[in-house]
Image (tube, rainbow, N blue to C red):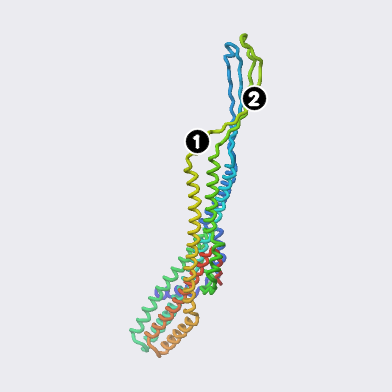
């Protein structure tokens, strides 16, 4: 069973996933934009607001009335009448003000959709970077297991020949078992990270087996002034806040328009039959009526809704100003985090990793020739693992900090090299 397990692990390590479903960053982001269910649901807010704009253009329906009158015509023959009338409510500027409100609401819906997409792409990108880190940690664990497995196999033969003690043989066997478990755990974490990517891409059953790309230092510099100008131009939440001010102003205008008394025009026609009463005869005739009805606006003495709309405008402006200051703070913090992360990434350079690997390979070679102790080999392996993990973590933090900095500016332009 041990031999079978060893063969399976070796097969997993050596298996090339290049022919399987390999996911690139650009293909991943394109799938997120096209298939993410949450984003697709948010997109419906735009056509909903467009439909509301169309609905805001409607005017009130006219009213048609028909009345029949019988002035005891069957008894004293005073005649019959038929009155037909139509009335039309007339508002002054209400429809135009309502359309303006709907347009501002549609603009806010568009900005909110852009903000949702910005956050979604940032979160998805960070998940892709997490997956790259998980893959690197899996590679480290794989290499460690391969080294320990090779040492354990060699030490078993050396113990049979009497070149090493049983304790050294048992030690390498234990180290190999521990390295195997760490590798399996790292592989599981990597596969779970791929499942997360498929979920973001709206294809949870896609079953991505591997990803293309490498952790790297973007090494791109902007000044705080440049970043601030970009944010003031591109941050969708700031645009939404400014449009909220316009919305509050248009709603205040609508409130004022709605306080104007609503008039009512009326037109009518009256068809009267001949009066055949002997005492008061009258010929058949047609009568016409036209009228204008205007309510007396006594309720307008209460200006509570006017005051409410004025305060809402002030509140929206203050909220937009507060958000602008918050954005400036976010940019400064994200910029500082990126500078620190970039410095750490430069500290753990590829040269440092190469030196640690050279030392490890030298210790392994010397141990197999009986020129060094197992403790020195394990120490070199631990040092190499720590350097590679620190290098991976530094690059991961640098890329994540770069994503957060771009997110703070509202313009996400990420390139992950294959």
Q: Position of residue 293 (x, y in %)?
A: 57, 31
- Tell which circle, 2 or 1, labels the residue nearer the N-terminal end: 2
Name the residue rendered at 49%, 39% in the picture: 301
Which sits in the foreground, 58 or 209?
58
Name the residue rendered at 62%, 9% in the picture: 278
Location of residue 268 (image quadrant): top right
Which sits in the foreground, 212 or 277?
277
Residue 288's disc is: 2
Which sits in the foreground, 297 or 279?
297
Q: Is residue 401 something one can see in this rendering?
A: yes
Q: Residue furthest top?
A: 278
The correct choice, above or below, for 56 with respect to 81 in the image is below
The correct choice, above or below, for 275 with respect to 120 in the image is above
Other residues around mark 2 within 10 Å, as few (<14) / some (14–19) / many (≥20): few
Q: Position of residue 402 (x, y in %)?
A: 51, 69
Name the residue rendered at 37%, 81% in the picture: 172
SS at mark 2 in the image: strand
Q: Position of residue 368 (x, y in %)?
A: 42, 87
Other residues around mark 1 within 10 Å, as few (<14) / some (14–19) / many (≥20): few
Residue placed under numbered mark 1 in the picture? 298
Q: Position of residue 283 (x, y in %)?
A: 66, 15
Question: The N terminus appears in which quarter of the rendering?
Answer: bottom left
Q: CA distance from mark 2 to mark 1?
A: 32 Å
């Amino acid at each position: 069973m041990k031999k079978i397990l060893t063969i399976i692990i070796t097969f997993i390590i050596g298996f090339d996933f290049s022919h399987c479903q390999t996911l690139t960053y650009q293909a991943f982001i394109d799938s997120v934009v096209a298939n993410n269910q949450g984003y697709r649901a948010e997109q419906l807010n735009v056509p909903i607001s467009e439909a509301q704009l169309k609905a805001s253009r409607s005017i009130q329906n006219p009213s048609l009335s028909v009345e029949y009158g019988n002035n005891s015509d069957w008894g004293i023959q005073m005649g019959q009448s038929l009155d037909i009338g139509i009335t039309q409510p007339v508002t002054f500027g209400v429809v135009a003000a309502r359309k303006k409100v709907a347009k501002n609401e549609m603009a806010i819906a568009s900005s909110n959709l852009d903000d949702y997409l910005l956050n979604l792409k940032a979160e998805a990108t960070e998940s892709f970077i997490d997956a790259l880190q998980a893959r690197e940690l899996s590679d480290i664990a794989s290499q460690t297991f391969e080294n320990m497995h090779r040492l354990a196999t060699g030490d078993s033969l050396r113990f049979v020949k009497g070149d090493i003690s049983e304790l050294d043989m048992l030690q390498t066997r234990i180290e190999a078992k521990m390295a195997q478990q760490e590798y399996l755990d790292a592989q599981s974490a990597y596969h779970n990270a791929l499942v997360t990517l498929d979920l973001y891409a709206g294809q949870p059953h896609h079953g991505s087996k591997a990803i293309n790309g490498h952790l790297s230092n973007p090494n791109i510099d902007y000044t705080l002034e440049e970043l601030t100008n970009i944010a003031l131009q591109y941050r969708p939440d700031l645009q939404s806040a400014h449009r909220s001010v316009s919305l509050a102003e248009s709603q205040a205008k609508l409130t004022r328009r709605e306080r104007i008394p609503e008039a009512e025009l009326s037109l009518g026609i009256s068809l009267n039959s001949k009066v055949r009463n002997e005492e008061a005869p009258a010929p058949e005739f047609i009568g016409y009526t036209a009228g204008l009805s205007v309510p007396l606006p006594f309720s307008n003495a209460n200006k509570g809704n006017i005051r409410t709309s004025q305060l809402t405008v002030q509140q929206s402006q203050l909220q937009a100003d507060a958000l602008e200051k918050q954005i400036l703070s976010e940019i400064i913090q994200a910029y500082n985090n990126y500078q620190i992360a970039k410095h750490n990434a430069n500290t753990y350079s590829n040269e440092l990793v190469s030196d640690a690997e050279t030392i490890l390979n030298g210790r392994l070679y010397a141990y197999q020739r009986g020129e060094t102790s197992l403790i020195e080999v394990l120490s070199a392996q631990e040092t190499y693992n720590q350097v590679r993990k620190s290098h991976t973590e530094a690059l991961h933090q640098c890329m994540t900090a770069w994503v957060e900095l771009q997110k703070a500016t509202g313009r996400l332009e990420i390139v992950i090299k294959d």
